[in-house]
Amino acid sequence: MIFTCVRDLTAHLQHLYGSPQATASPEICPPGMNGDITVNCFRLAGPLRTNPQELADAAVAFLSAHTDVASCERIKAFVNITLTCVALCRDTVEHKTVCIPERAVPGDASRHVLIEYSAPNTNKPQHLGHVRNNTLGSALCSIIRRTGQRVTAVNLVNDRGVHICKSMVAYRRYGCGETPESHGAKGDHYIGSYYVKFETTFREQIQELRKHNADLAETKAADMFLDTEIGRAAQDELVAWENGDLDVRALWHRLNSWVLEGFSTTYARLGIVFDHTYFESETYKIGKNVVLQDRENFSRTEDGAVVADLSADKLGQKVLLRRDGTSVYVTQDIGTTLMKYEDFRPDTMIWIVGDEQIHHFKVLFAIIRKMGFEWSSRLHHIPYGMVNLPSGKMKSREGTVVDADDLLDEMVVLARSATRERHPTLDDAELDKRATAIGIGALKFMLLKMNPRTTMTFDPAAAIRFEGDSGPYVQYAHARIASLLQKYNHDSATQIDWSLPNSDEERRIAVRCAMYPEILDAAARDFDPSVICGYLIDLTKDFNRFYKKHSVLSAPSDALKAVRIALCRRVQQILGDGLAVLNIEALDEM
RNA sequence: GCGCCCGUAGCUCAGCUGGAUAGAGCGUCUGCCUCCGGAGCAGAAGGUCACAGGUUCGAAUCCUGUCGGGCGUACCA
């Protein structure tokens, strides 16, 4: 927020106290206080090395004489300012670019950010946890784009490894050559069922082993993987895959294509588009070669493993190649990181990956730095918290995962019946359109409104409510304004008189609108969409309060009607921009 | 064991570069559809900010300790 009088105050105080770095930054005046904006002189007093209350007195003295200021008062060291209506509107809602900047950070316009997110495994369908990742990732892409930076969104599909082979083995045994089509199933769900089948059989075989050998009672199932017949088969499948066995590769290719087709419809429903998709099957060997060729930064242990010494970073020794020469997870990520850098030459790279991998990224970034890449300081892991259910953690083994597609279906069905209730005669196509926007919007908003880092509890009952602190609440205000604007017959192109919207409610909206640019900045800087959600809720609440109390179309005068329409239009523009930036659809009717 | 994160209203979450009476939504209870879309608005009840110390004019916010929870600490991914 930039208010002329506060900017002038800053200049005055800097001159008065001879401290050029102290800047008075206005805040919204808390409810119940008398004023539009507040300058907190407790904060300012530090840099200016002066007494807070004296400073506040000086500020009041200066501001009282300022032409923009209607009145101002000091409470403790807070200076509450009431502006003249004309000045308030001039510094906030009168000009569109003040509230809705073309670019929020012009200085960084040339920055190119590469964002990797989603990163699914092709052995099972996506669940609620992936939806949080996808929603967060796509929102961050558009937020950062909104601030004027260039964004490249990439996906890294984990399409190889023993977990993929598990589904393949099960399909060989139980699939009978059938296809998703013949089952009327979505490809990823279809393959997921074989993954489950594998796990079931595997557990049965573990039971058998334990029954015949009491010593194994305490041994972990994972440690007995190769002792089971089906586990052995999966391992053999993996070896055959790595050897390029034609039959195995053909099956692998067929099953993966089914899964990827399934994913693509889920992504489409979520409005997610990647600029590029990497496949681990194509990238997993890069890191190994890089590590092998780098004798300078990595060393060999006596048994032949290759390790990186990260003790300088307090991360100890990290094995990069096992003694049998095979690579580990972080080694693959070294390879893809270098590859992504070569492919796109971004200024910064970010990864949207769960918080359980914080340590992994510390190790990865330390290795990249050790290898001497100066851009290693511009790599960021954006960790997000797990999604739990009211009943506890989601566990695929116990069948408590919330499937992504089922959830999307359910949200849309509920939104449809809620919409149908309100508009009994609406045709199906329009009903579908609205229900999709509302249902998916509600889900996304619910996932985004929390700080990404918090481990969240997903309450299905709360998710399906389209009231209160929700996406539809914001969408609804947007739609109401649309209908208002449509009803307004803008016959007179009269000059708008910005001295008229003088109520508390109108003033509050004006100040709130002016906050939008810094909200965008904060969201982009902190990689946190939730600040936008919170802001949109506040703005919507401000609007609804105004809308209830003051008539727009039946305003006492045409001039007041015109200015209120202008105010509503500004609110709608911000709501639309904010929703767009969260990758949530705004509606004109709902 | 060590490391990181977290404990705020019945529930889900904000607030945490120290600052004005700790906020919102849901749930509970009261009101409001002769008037711009009630997916809305107005209001009430509900909190020793896990606990104990400390720093400060001032602490939910910073520091230390205790208790409770999560995650990590692989030659798994």
Image (cartoon, coloured by chain):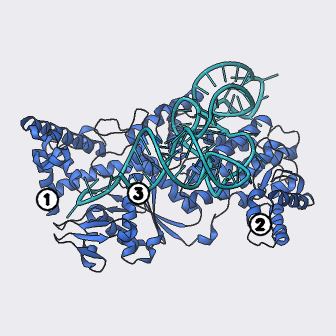
- In this picture, is B67 found above or below A576? above
> What's the residue type where badge 2 is placed?
Arg
> What's the residue type where badge 3 is placed?
Ile
Quadrant placement of the N terminus of chain A: bottom right
* Residue A99 appears anywhere in the view: yes
Which residue is at a point 77% across and 66% down the rendered structure image?
A: A49
Which residue is at a point 62% across and 42% down the rendered structure image?
A: A474
Q: State whether discs 1 and 2 lie on one chain.
A: yes
Task: Give the secondary structure at mark 1.
Answer: helix
First along the sequence among labels 1 and 3: 1
Q: State whether discs 3 and 2 lie on one chain.
A: yes
**Res A521 quadrant in image:** bottom right
**Residue corresponding to mark 2:** A49
Left or right of B28: which side holds A279?
Answer: left
Left or right of A468: which side holds A154?
Answer: left
**Residue corresponding to mark 1:** A239
Left or right of B67: which side holds A148?
Answer: right
Task: Say which mark, if any, is on residue A358.
Answer: 3
Chain A drawing hue: blue
Which one is nearer the viewer's eye here, A37 or A280?
Answer: A37
Distance, label 3 to label 2, CA atoms, is: 41 Å
First along the sequence among labels 3 and 2: 2
- In this picture, is A553 found above or below A320? above
Distance, label 1 to label 3, CA atoms, is: 31 Å
Quadrant placement of the C terminus of chain A: top right
Rendered location of residue B52, percent (x, y)? 57, 41
Pointer 3 chain:
A
Residue that extends furthest to the right in the rendered view of this protein = A65
Task: Give the secondary structure at mark 3.
Answer: helix
Determine whether label 1 and label 2 are within 8 Å by CB: no
Chain B drawing hue: cyan
> What's the residue type where badge 1 is placed?
Val
